[in-house]
Image (cartoon, coloured by chain):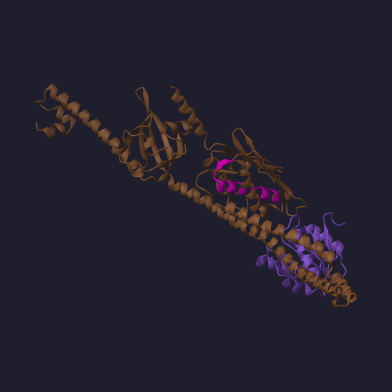
């Protein structure tokens, strides 16, 4: 029999019905057949994995790469041959990139128990950082485990999210700008008026000074003293020096107030709209909140008193300052709208917005409380849904709280909760972890355990 | 009806010249009214200041000013409500009302003028522009 026939038997039936086949031959054929089946299965699985839309990576518990599909080659740049046997921390998850700490999948699998889907950053061969979603499942292998992970590139999703946040920021800055123009216009008006007044007053005072100068010359023997004294009296009276003295002082004081008001609005606006860094920076959240209150003054001052109760002991909190500002702004604007709704068309008094910060259990807490209309029980579950709004067309796009949730929960691993009593008011409680990720602490703990073994 | 306690009369400490006009200025920023008061005093105009629309309404009733100047965006009653209430009160309807605001768009301006507002001026307003309007109603 030709070797080809052995390797590629036409069918199992024809090979077993060979009239001249011995038992050994049949057995050999059956082994070959099994081998061929296994090879085909292997090939089939290989092709399945290689044609997957996501990168597939299989590692030992220690993070040594066992398997690496074509998509992984494409996404990360390392070929299968280069990467097999290497540790993940030498390739896609170096300690400097992964914000979940150094490590392999073992670490990621321990970070969060729910769903085993983790968003993190990975590095490519070129050194670029990309955002990925990793879905991991452990597979028993003898006395140990193998970790299999599908890694999905979510860079474009992240970019879209960032654009959406940015769009909402632009929208609110657009809304704010009319209010800010008004806030700046008013001091501009009276600083201008006061300066004109000072100019005119200075002319009058110069007139009086000139008279006094004449008086001096008269006393020194160059004129009619009595006549000049009468003139001094007349001019001084006309200038109304007492009035000028008081009003000049007041107008200088008020103009300085106005200028510093403009400066503080401009400064707050600049800090508010600062795009901020893409990574978390230690931030004085009390200062950010005060800036945001200033920027939004025109949104709340007609309907509410603003009360702040800041914890002076608040340490710097690792956060994305621009995004946090946006959340605070959204909450303030919501509070002002809720109060306006409660006050009705002809308010006889203002409501109150109370913003407080506090440290509690490794979290920085920010409370935004209003005496507004409250949120009806029936819609309370939906308020964080994107595009959900009860406000009229043009008042809000329904993005405010959805973005607040996304910023606080997804980007900061914090929490945002609402407590509302219809007719009495609403409190939003934002909690931000004091440490960048509680997972960091876990990691240290793990290392300690490992070292002590 | 008494003037609310926080109403302020802005007058020169030594007001001697005879006033040629009493203007009620309604704006929630006291510094703004004070600035106008200083400048208008040179034209012998006396300014009374109210901080919001509601206070402005009561002061209009009690003081019967010659002219009312009001902002639009204010706490309690905004300028719109003040203008509406003034126009509905037979005793006050005749007092010329000028709006000085940073918030008046074209449509708003039309609506205000339809309600009897004599002029709508954009903040910040130059004194000359304001005087042009005031001269129509005061002998300066």
Judging depth in this view, the residue of B3 and A243 nearest the camera is: A243
Which residue is depicted at the point 78% across and 68% down?
Answer: A201
Q: Hey, which residue is sitting farthest bottom in the picture?
A: A223
In the rendered image, is residue B88 in sight? no
Which chain is displayed in brown in the rendered image?
A
Q: Colour of chain B?
A: purple
Rendered location of residue A355, percent (x, y): 67, 44
Judging depth in this view, the residue of A389 and B126 nearest the camera is: B126
Span highlighted in magenta in the image: A316-340
Q: Hey, which residue is sitting farthest front in the picture?
A: A221
Left or right: residue A221 compared with residue A395: right
Using the rendered view, name the quadrant where residue A259 is placed. bottom right
Left or right: residue A106 compared with residue B77: left
In the rendered image, is residue A291 in sight? yes
Rendered location of residue B77, percent (x, y): 76, 57
Which residue is depicted at the point 67% across and 50% down?
Answer: A337
Q: Tell me if residue A326 comes above or below residue B112 in the rendering.
A: above
Which residue is depicted at the point 78% across and 66% down?
Answer: B38
| Quadrant (top left/top right/bottom left/bottom right) for the N terminus of chain A | top left
Using the rendered view, name the quadrant where residue A374 is placed. top right
């Amino acid at each position: 029999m030709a070797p080809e026939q052995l390797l590629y038997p036409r069918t199992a039936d024809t090979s077993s019905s060979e009239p001249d086949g011995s038992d050994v031959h049949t057995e050999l054929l059956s082994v070959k057949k099994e081998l061929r089946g296994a090879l085909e299965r292997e090939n089939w699985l290989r092709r399945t994995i290689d044609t997957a839309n996501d990168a597939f990576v299989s590692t030992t518990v220690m993070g040594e790469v066992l398997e690496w599909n074509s998509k992984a080659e494409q996404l990360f740049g390392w070929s299968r041959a280069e990467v097999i046997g290497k540790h993940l921390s030498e390739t896609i998850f170096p300690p400097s990139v992964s914000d979940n700490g150094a490590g392999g999948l073992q670490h990621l699998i321990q970070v969060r128990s729910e769903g085993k889907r983790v968003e993190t950053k990975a590095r490519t061969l070129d050194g670029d950082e990309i955002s990925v979603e990793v879905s991991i499942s452990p597979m028993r292998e003898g006395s140990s485990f193998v970790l299999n992970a599908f890694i999905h590139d979510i860079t474009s999703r992240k970019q879209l999210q960032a654009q959406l946040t940015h769009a909402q920021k632009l929208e609110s800055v657009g809304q704010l700008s009319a209010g800010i123009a008004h806030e700046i216009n008013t001091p501009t008006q009276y600083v201008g008026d006061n300066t004109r007044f000072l100019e005119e007053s200075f002319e009058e005072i110069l007139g009086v000074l000139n008279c006094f100068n004449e008086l001096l010359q008269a006393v020194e023997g160059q004129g009619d003293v009595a006549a000049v004294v009468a003139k001094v009296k007349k001019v001084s009276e006309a200038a109304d020096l007492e009035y000028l003295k008081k009003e000049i002082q007041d107008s200088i004081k008020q103009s300085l107030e106005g200028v510093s008001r403009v400066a503080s609005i401009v400064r707050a606006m600049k800090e508010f709209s600062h795009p901020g860094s893409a990574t978390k920076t230690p931030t004085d959240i009390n200062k950010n909140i005060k800036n945001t209150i200033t920027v939004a003054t025109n949104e709340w001052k007609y309907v509410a008193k603003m009360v702040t109760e800041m914890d002076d002991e608040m340490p710097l909190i690792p956060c994305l300052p621009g995004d946090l500002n946006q959340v605070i702004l959204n909450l303030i604007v919501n509070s002002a709208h809720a109060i306006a709704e409660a006050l009705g068309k002809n308010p006889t008094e203002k409501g109150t917005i109370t913003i407080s910060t506090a440290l509690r259990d490794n979290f920085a807490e920010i409370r935004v409380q209003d005496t507004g209309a409250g949120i009806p029980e029936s819609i309370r579950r939906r308020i964080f849904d994107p595009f959900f709004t009860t406000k009229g067309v043009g008042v809000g796009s329904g993005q405010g709280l959805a973005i607040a949730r996304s910023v606080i929960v997804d980007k900061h691993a914090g929490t945002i909760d609402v407590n509302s009593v219809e007719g009495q008011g609403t409190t939003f409680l934002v909690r931000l972890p004091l440490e960048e990720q509680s997972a960091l602490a876990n990691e240290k703990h793990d290392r300690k355990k490992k070292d002590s073994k | 009806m008494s003037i609310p306690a926080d109403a302020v009369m802005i007058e020169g400490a030594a007001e001697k010249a005879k006033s040629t006009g009493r203007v009620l200025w309604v704006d929630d920023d006291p510094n703004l009214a004070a600035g106008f008061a200083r400048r208008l005093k040179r034209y012998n105009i006396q300014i009374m200041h109210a901080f919001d629309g509601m206070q402005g309404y009561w002061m209009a009733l009690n003081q019967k000013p010659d002219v009312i100047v009001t902002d639009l965006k204010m706490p309690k009653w905004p300028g719109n409500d003040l203008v509406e209430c003034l126009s509905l009160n037979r005793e006050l309807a005749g007092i010329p009302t000028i709006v000085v605001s940073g918030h008046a768009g074209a449509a708003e301006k039309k609506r205000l003028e339809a309600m009897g507002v004599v002029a709508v001026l954009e903040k910040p307003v130059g004194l000359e522009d304001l005087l042009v309007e005031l001269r129509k109603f005061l002998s300066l």
